Image (tube, helix red, strand yellow):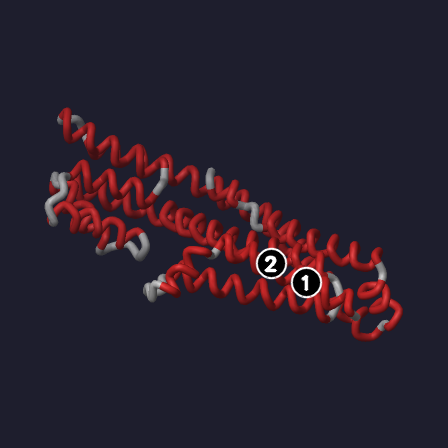
């Protein structure tokens, strides 16, 4: 019993030190009475989930190494979730970009004013694209040049098609070439890429469903064995082999999840 308590203290100290290292900015914010932002709140939720997972593995499974492993993988899991959200936002911007570019092309052809075209497109497409287009107009009216507003737009959207669009607009405005042709050409490129991405998503959807079932099955089976089988519970909590198997299962769960969410390759096409 003393050994178990000692191991728990060592693991708690190691995890606490590791978390303090990564969340030192949040700790400083508390002492300096700074206002928490969304990122701080996100980190606190991550800390809570990691702590709960650590307690479960230590108390129920008597497996401090698995608790440390679970905490590390949960941190990686949460970080990956942020990346996935950003990629989903970029994908949504691309999907809305086709319609937006067509509207911009038509309005520019009619009015001959790129800012009026952006403003008209912002009124016709949903967020987040409408917000980004409208921000270009607001920044220009606030005193920025058209090149500065478009450059900031490129940085926020972070999309190569819109980068081509904005640079094409800036060059065409500078040298007096046909801006409408530039907009139409980029719209065609985006349309082809969206069609290809949807085809690949359909092919991967069946594979993802199979792996999701696998992700659910492993913890369910492990829980049933732990509850209803004394032999399995003894193996998991009291033998080295059982603890190693538990750590391997944790790694498999994480690897399978990351594999199914690895469709960012499709989003980047």
Front one among 174 and 73: 73
Outermost residue to the right: 231
| Residue 64: x %, y % from top left | 71, 61
Q: Is residue 160 left or right of residue 237?
A: left
Q: Nearer the viewer, mark 1 or mark 2?
A: 2
Residue at 56% in and 65% down? 49
Q: Helix or strand or loop: what does disc 2 sit on?
A: helix
Residue 42's label in the rendered image is none
Q: Residue furthest top?
A: 175
From what the image shows, is residue 19 above or below residue 176? below
The front one of 16 and 257 is: 16
| In the displayed structure image, the side of residue 55 where residue 157 appears, left or right | left
**Residue 216: image tag:** 1
* Residue located 34% across and 49% down the image: 96
> Which quadrant of the structure image shows residue 214?
bottom right
x 23%, y 52%: residue: 122
- In percent of width and height, residue 140 lies at 14, 45
Tally of marks: 2
- Mark 2, residue position: 15
* Image quarter of residue 66: bottom right
Residue 63 x %, y %: 74, 62
Question: In what element is the residue under mark 1?
Answer: helix
Question: Which is nearer the N-term, disc 1 or disc 2?
Answer: 2
Task: Give the crowd class for mark 1: few <14, some 14-19, many >=20 residues within 10 Å.
Answer: few
Quarter in which the N terminus is drawn: bottom right
> Which quadrant would residue 61 be assigned to in this image?
bottom right
Is residue 32 placed above or below 96 in the rendered structure?
Answer: below
- Residue 129 visible in rendering: yes
């Amino acid at each position: 019993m003393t050994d178990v308590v000692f191991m728990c203290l060592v693991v708690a100290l190691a995890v606490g030190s590791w978390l303090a290292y990564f969340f030192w900015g949040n700790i400083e914010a508390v002492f300096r009475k700074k206002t928490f932002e969304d990122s701080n709140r996100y980190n606190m939720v991550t800390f809570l989930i990691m702590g709960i997972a650590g307690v479960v593995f230590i108390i129920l499974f008597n497996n401090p190494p698995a608790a440390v492993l679970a905490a590390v993988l949960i941190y990686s899991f949460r970080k990956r979730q942020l990346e996935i959200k950003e990629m989903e936002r970029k994908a949504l911007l691309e999907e809305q970009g086709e319609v937006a570019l067509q509207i911009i092309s038509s309005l520019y052809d009619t009015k001959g004013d790129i800012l009026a075209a952006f403003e008209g497109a912002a009124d016709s497409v949903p967020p987040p694209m409408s917000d980004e287009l409208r921000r270009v107009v607001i920044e220009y009216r606030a005193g920025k040049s058209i090149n500065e507003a478009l450059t900031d737009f490129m940085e926020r959207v972070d999309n190569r098609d819109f980068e081509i669009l904005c640079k094409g607009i800036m060059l065409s405005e500078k040298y007096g070439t046909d801006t409408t042709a530039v907009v139409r050409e980029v719209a065609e490129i985006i349309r082809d890429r969206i069609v290809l991405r949807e085809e690949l998503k359909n092919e991967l959807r069946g594979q993802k469903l199979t792996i999701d079932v696998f992700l659910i099955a492993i913890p369910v089976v492990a829980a049933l064995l732990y509850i209803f089988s004394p032999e399995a519970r003894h193996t998991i909590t009291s033998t080295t082999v059982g603890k190693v198997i538990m750590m391997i299962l944790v790694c498999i769960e994480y690897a399978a999840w990351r594999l199914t969410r690895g469709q960012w390759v499709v989003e980047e096409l």
